[in-house]
Structure formats: structure tokens, C-alpha cells
Image (cartoon, helix red, strand yellow):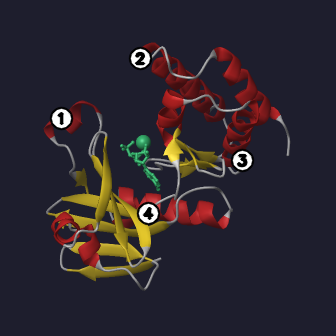
Amino acid sequence: MKINKLNKQICLFNSDTFSASLFELDYLQGNNLITGSSVGRGTTWFFQHQQKKYVLRHYYRGGLIGKINPDNFLYCGLKNTRAYKEFSLLEKMSQLGLPIPQPYAGRITKKNLFYQADLIIELIEGAEDLVAVLSRQVISELQWLEIGRVIRLFHDNNIYHSDMNSHNIMLDDSDKVWLIDFDKCAQRTAGAWKEQTLARLLRSFRKEKTKNSHFNWSEQYWEFLMIGYQQTN
Ligand SMILES: Nc1ncnc2c1ncn2[C@@H]1O[C@H](COP(=O)(O)OP(=O)(O)O)[C@@H](O)[C@H]1O
Ligand SMILES: [Mg+2]
């Protein structure tokens, strides 16, 4: 990871094609580089740059504090910023060969005691998150097994996902399974968090089913996912 400090702005990147203007929405919009967006807590922007596609995300706080102070975090050194942590975790997972989007660049903007942060990662081509897929169609038993196997792969590498839900699992058009959204995630020592992560994911499927009775998920599919998880590779 290369680090570039300029006044109040710190950029992290590992590609020569990086330019800090890619963090500016005005620049992306003004140059017609935006190809789409997804609205969650904040807006995730999709854009293209030199024949490649990327995803730009701004870091937001959750919970009650987030309502008053949506995107300012207390600055406790570069290595403790959200963007630095997620960028380096993505680099580590990439080295481990885990199916995650490649990190492209991070930006930390300091404001007195606080900072704001953004991250750019590569777009996973032809991929859709599991909620989008299951809202439209069923997926095969083999795909459920594969989802379980992939989650297990992360757990065997002691990668903790703090927000393991069905929106953060993606399937591409060759049925490859990807995990995304690694804010506040980390490599940890083994522990009860693995089971808790699975319990959280199960709650997330149940919640989607309650919201939409046509959601193509049932408890039986969870059994397949768990078989995939429990198989030793
Ligand atoms: N690297 C990526 N490639 C393709 N789509 C992505 C990628 N990252 C995010 N998305 C899409 O954008 C949505 C929101 O992104 P995410 O990083 O999960 O942010 P949040 O959950 O905070 O809204 C995802 O559910 C997914 O559909
Ligand atoms: Mg998400």
C-alpha cells in the first residue's frame, strides 16, 4: 500500500492509475464516469476509469450517534482509521486467495480532531447480491453448499465479518460466491464469533423472508448452506 499525504488529506492506493479526483463525486459526474448507484445507509457509487469498473463508498456511522454525527470519526492515527483498516484487511484477504473485491484506494480527510473517509474497490463484474438474486429466482442446492463452503473458508482463515447478512454475499454469472462490505471486520483468533456470525446470517434470511414472502429462501436451504460449511475441504 502506498501512502500519499497532502495537507489534510491522506490517500492510500496500490495502483499507478489512481488519481485523487476519483474520490470527488463532482469529478465523476462531470466526466460522465458514473454507471450506477445503490442506496443503503449512504450511497454506493459505481463508476468506470480507464476501462475498469469501481465502487466508491463513504464511511458512515450507524446507530444513534450516526443520526447526530453521520460521518465524522475521532482521529486516533492513520492505522486506526476505517479506510486504512478495511484497505489492509482486503489486501490481506487477497493474499490469502479469498473471494473479495480488490482494494483500489482509500482517502482520509482530517478535520481538527476528526476525520471522514472513503474507499474505492474494484467492481465484481456480473455479480448481484443474494437478496437481489433470491428476490427473483431460486438457486440450486449446489450453490447453497458453495455459499457455506466459502463462509467456512473465511472462518478457517479467522476472518471475522461484522455484518454477515444476505446483502453482503454476492454471486457472479459463473456462480462464484463473493463476500463484500468489510468495514469493522478483522482477522481474529478463533472463537464463538464464528457461530454468532452464522446465527446472524440465518436471522438475515428469515428477516428477508418476512419482508417478502416471495423471497426464494426457506429453512431447508439453510441446511444445505450448513452442510457446505461443515464439509472439510
Ligand atoms: N465490489 C462490488 N462489486 C459489485 N457490487 C458491489 C460491490 N460492492 C458493493 N456492491 C453492491 O452495492 C451494495 C452496497 O454495498 P456495501 O458495500 O454492502 O454497502 P452498504 O451495505 O453500506 O450499503 C451491495 O449490496 C452490492 O449490491
Ligand atoms: Mg452491505
Question: Pointer 2: what residue?
Answer: 211
Q: Is mark 4 within 8 Å of ligand 1?
A: yes
> Within the image, what quadrant is residue 220 found in?
top right
Instruction: Single out the mark in the foreground, 4 or 2.
Output: 2
Instruction: Single out the mark in the foreground, 4 or 3.
Output: 4
Instruction: Kindly identify which numbered label has been placed on residue 121.
Output: 4
| Three-letter amino acid code of the residue under disc 3 | Leu
Question: How much space separates mark 1 and mark 2, taking CA atoms?
Answer: 25 Å
> Within the image, what quadrant is residue 22 found in?
bottom left
Residue 148 lies, in percent from the top left, at 70, 36
Q: Is residue 9 left or right of residue 161?
A: left
Question: How much space separates mark 4 and mark 2, taking CA atoms?
Answer: 30 Å
Instruction: Single out the mark in the foreground, 1 or 4.
Output: 4
Q: Secondary structure at mark 3?
A: helix
Q: Is mark 3 within 8 Å of ligand 1?
A: no
Instruction: Kindly identify which numbered label has been placed on residue 67.
Output: 1
